[in-house]
Amino acid sequence: MIDGVVVKKLKVVPDERGRLMEILRSDDQFFEKFGQAYITTAYPGVVKAWHRHKKQTDHFTCLKGMAKLVLYDDRPKSKTRGTLGEFFLGEHNPVLIQIPPGIWHGFKCVSESECICLNLPSELYQYARPDEERIAAHKNKIPYDWARKDR
């Protein structure tokens, strides 16, 4: 596990009307602060990667479909530098992943239909000066291949 990454198993509470699932609470032990909430989607097979933040902590989950979230620790002083983390999240595995600043991350839709992901970052997005660094999804310094792995 990458140092500073937190995985929270989400509890789905179903009844005859539908279901409820809490995602992030201000009394969660790892909660820092709230910046904003947004959704991002991807069509089947699409990769949205790579980026990282200097200040922002992300709280990422997949609400519809399935996503493969990949993390890479490139932080110079981290005890887990060089470590990759791969998580499958969504309808079949409802989890919230806390991604600390400095961790490269991206996701791929691995379901047969569009995946819808929710992020609850700790900071507001600053349009004039975004707190993010981006690199290409496939040809870069990160030792990860987004191709499907038939194990």
Image (cartoon, grey):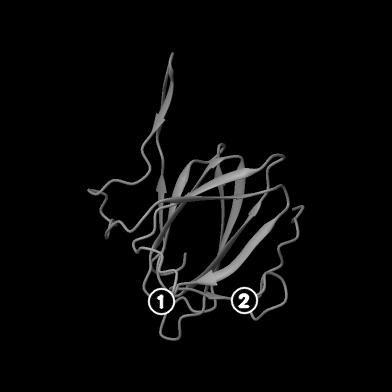
Above/below status of 15 relative to 118: above
Identify the disc placed on residue 54: 1
Mark found first going from the N terminus, 1 or 2? 1
Residue at coordinates 34% horizontally, 64% vertically from top-left? 123
Type of amino acid under label 2: Ile
In this view, the residue farthest toward the bottom is: 76
Identify the disc placed on residue 106: none
Q: Position of residue 33 (x, y in %)?
A: 27, 59
Identify the disc placed on residue 135: 2
In this view, the residue farthest toward the left is: 27
Above/below status of 77 relative to 50: below
- Give the quadrant of residue 46: bottom right
Residue at coordinates 39% horizontally, 48% vertically from top-left? 8
SS type, badge 1: loop
Density class for disc 1 (Cα within 10 Å; few <14, some 14-19, many ≥20) is few
Position of residue 48 in the picture relative to residue 119 (left or right): right
Q: Please name whichever residue, 23 or 43, is drawn nearer the observer in this view of the structure.
A: 43
